[in-house]
Structure formats: C-alpha cells, structure tokens
Image (spheres, grey):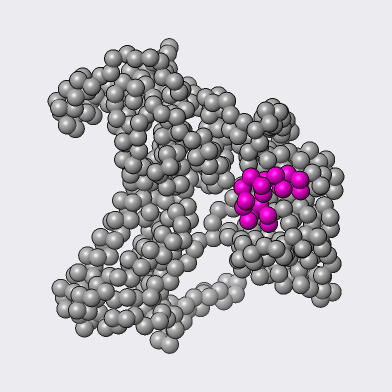
Amino acid sequence: MAKYLLLKHYRGAPAAVNDVPMDQWTPEQISAHVQYMNDFAARLEKTGEFVDGQALAPEGTWVRYDGEGRPPVTDGPFAETKDLIAGWMVIDVDSYERAVELAGELSAAPGAGGKPIHEWLELRPFLGVRPTITE
Amino acid sequence: MPPEVNEALLRSLTPSVLAVLVRRGADFAAAEDAVQDALVEAVRVWPADPPRDAKGWLVTVAWRKFLDASRADTARRRREDLVDEEPAPGPAPAVDDTLQLYFLCAHPSLTPSSAVALTLRAVGGLTTRQIAQAYLVPEATMAQRISRAKRTVSGVRFDRPGDVATVLRVLYLVFNEGYSGDVDLAAEAIRLTRQLAVAIDHPEVAGLLALMLLHHARRAARTAPDGSLVPLAEQDRGRWDTESIAEGVEILQAALARDRLGEFQAQAAIAALHADAPTAQETDWVQIVEWYDELERLTDSPVVRLNRAVAVGEADGPRAGMAALAALDQALPRHTAVAAYLHERDGDLTTAAQLYTEAAQKAPNLAERDHLTRQAARLNARGSR
C-alpha cells in the first residue's frame, strides 16, 4: 500500500484542455461538477482507498519568525505567486498504476459545456514508513 | 479494580471460534461480524464474570449474535435456509480450520492491502479501528476495505487447501510495515506466523518465522533515541535480543535440515549470519554472498541482486561490488545509495558525497532520506576541512 497526494492547482499547472473559468459555466454545469467530485470521493471510500480531501481558499498569508520576543512577520498574499494550490485528495492504493488511474478519473470531472475539463493534476507519493527488512 | 481481560488469549481464540461458526453454516462475512461482536462483549463482561471455558463462551455468544443479526436482516427466510442446508455431520475436515482461515484471508482474488486487512481482523482479532490506526487511514475507509474483502471471498469454498506461499506473503507484508500507533504490527505478524506454524508443518513457514524473529531481535538497536536510523554495522550488538536470536536460529536450523529450501529460509540464513557476528568486522560475508546466490536463484529478484552487490563489496572489496552493481538497472530503488556506499568504501569521497545527496532525493521514506543526507553532510564537512 502506498499513499499519494492528488494536488489540484488554481495556478501553476499546465493549461487544461477544456480551460474555461468556472464563472463562465452554467449553474447546472457547476452543480454537475460538484456532484462528480462528491461521487468520486464517495466511491473511493467504498473501495477503501480514501484518506482525506480538502479544498483551500485561494488567498493565504506568508509568515516567518522574526527573532526572540518579536511577533512573527506576515506578508502577502502575493498576486504574482506562480504556484497556487486549490486543494488535495489523499489516497491509499495498491500501486502507482492505480494512483494514476484515479487521478485520470478525477481529471475527467465535467466543466464548461458539460465536457471533461482534462485538468492537469499533480500526483505526489508520500514518503512511506521505513520497512523493517531492508538489508 | 476488576482484572484486565487477557487480550492475547481472546485474540488467539478468534480464528477457531470463527471457524466453528462457518462450519455450522454461517456465511463467512456474517460470522466474522458476529465474532467481532462477541469479542467486544467479552471485553465488557469477563472482568466481572470470567468464563470457565473461554472458547465455549465465545462460540455461544458469537452464534447468538449471528442468529440475532440474521433475524434482523432477512428474517425467516435466512433461518429456514440455514435449517434446510444444515449439513449432516460428515467426515472430519482434512484441513485444520484455523489454517483454512489463513488461506481464505490471503485468497489470490484479494489485493494485497485487502488480504492484509482481512487477515488482521478475521485471524488476528484486531478491531477495524486498530487496523485503520496502524495503516494511517480513516476507520470508515478501513471498514469498507474489509467488507469488500469479505464480499470478494464470500463464494470461496472453505474446505479446500490454499497456497501457503500467498499466506506467507501477506504475513511478510504485515511484518515489514513496522509499527505506528497503538498496534505493533511486527509483533502481531510474529504471533500470526507462530500460530500458522502450529497449524501447518512447512519449512517456509518456519523460515519466515525465523526471519521475523531474527529481524525483530535487532529492533531496539536499529533506531537511535532521536529516531534516526542506525545502520547494521554501527548497531550496539549488546542491545540485540539474544533470546529471540537463539529461537530464530533454532527454528531455521530445523527447517534447513529438511532440505526444502525456499526464499524465506534463505533470507533468514542471511539474517542469522549477521546475528552470529560478535562485531560487524567478523561478519562472514563470503557465506552471505553464497546465500544471496541461492536467493537469486529462488526469486530472480533485482532487489536481491542489489543486496548481493553490497555483500560482494564487503566480501571481495568495493571494486567487485561496483562491478556487480554495474550489471543492474539504475532505476532500482536504493541503487544510488548502494553506489554511494561502495564509492565511499573505495575512497572516492567526492563522488560518494554527490551520490548520497542524489540517493537522499530518491529515498522512499523519511528515515532513509535523513540518514543519506547526513552521510552526504559528513563527507562534505570532511572535504572542506
């Protein structure tokens, strides 16, 4: 078993095939999209492969330590940030091939015109637990 | 305070109680649920009212739970079918019931993760929550994985022997997961393999048990107090569990004497040679290489060839190790880490440092990544001095 993170980007991913901003879709198309995402997560729960899924607000703050006794410095959000994460799903699957298959399904979520978005999703393996027998 | 329920006893009875229900005609999935319910009730009731016959108590309660569930479920029809189908007491089963459960839970129609989960629950008696915690997934996900696995094997006949090799692979997977959370999966894998060794006399079952004991014996020495990895050569051998080693070696010797070598016996033999050496320098690498040759013949595995290259490096010098490594696919996991180690042994510290850095980037887990990064840092610091 191996865990993978499926990352969805607001910005920073290559352009999708059906690349129309969501506010240009019809309300029905938005509903269909949301339904597809929910169904996908529910299906993964049933197959015993779902771990977690979360969406993130697009705007965030940068924070850093500023020395002993001082409050942390905050900055941003920066409009020019190239890479912006929209959300993620964590899956626990038997193989890399299965992870790719699932990412492909998620990328087929319907968008404008009710057609699949063909959105690029980033697939990242978790650093696993150290196996007992390595030598 | 009421006495604690002997959880080890309770869990060791799980497979035989489950087998009784299945023999009585309960379908596997429903029987398994009923046994889990009975275990929960035992934990609640036993402290105040311990049974004289623990197994008899569990069978009675589990059977009652099963009947209750059947009534609630499909009411009369199910019970009537059951009465109709109740088999006449036939000849004694040819295969041990507990053994049958192992076969069923490791059935080839299951994916590895499903087989692992089902084995831990139906044979190991762990709760879904414990299994979910051990594998770091939500309980709902693990519950679905287990119920799907039960559906998958629901049509499998219970009275035919399966393949021991598939069972051993599942137990090996459980052992190798190490441990996280409440449940010590390595200890659980040892317990289940021990139980299997009682149910079936097979040299590879003994081989796997020996392998687990020999590796488990080194566990305390394998991790530093800060959680970092301690390589075999640097481990404090005084912290190895000599009792566990002695048992592993004894089991292995008895298995090897039967002259039916298999991959687990060969792996255990390598582990035993490491355990035998009073210091890392006294390790019998020549014999270890010979065992890797056997293992390669048995498994034809590229991972075995990679480990063999390390052993060759120790037995015949780093150049010989590098020559063995050169024949292997560079994409193999840990190939770069082995190359780094052999270059360091050969005195080429600059290349070794670069390779350690590269290996750290490819490491499959955090402990190995940190370890490899530290190796690179150690060599880089030496160069700048």
Q: Residue at x 41, y 79 (%)?
A: A13
Residue B101 vertical placement versus B369 (above, below):
above
Which percent across, then down, holds residue A119? 34, 76
Viewer-side residue, B385 vs B63: B63
Viewer-side residue, B202 vs B49: B202
Please check the rendered image and state whether residue B298 is part of the magenta-colored stretch, yes or no.
Answer: yes
Which quarter of the picture shows residue B187? top right
Q: Residue at x 78, y 66 (%)?
A: B343
Q: Main secondary structure of the magenta part?
A: helix
Which percent across, then down, holds residue B335? 66, 62
Which quarter of the picture shows residue B66? top left
Which percent across, then down, holds residue A97? 44, 61
Magenta span covers which residues? B288-306
Viewer-side residue, A63 vs A94: A94
Please check the rendered image and state whether residue B58 is part of the magenta-colored stretch, yes or no.
Answer: no
Viewer-side residue, B124 vs B253: B253
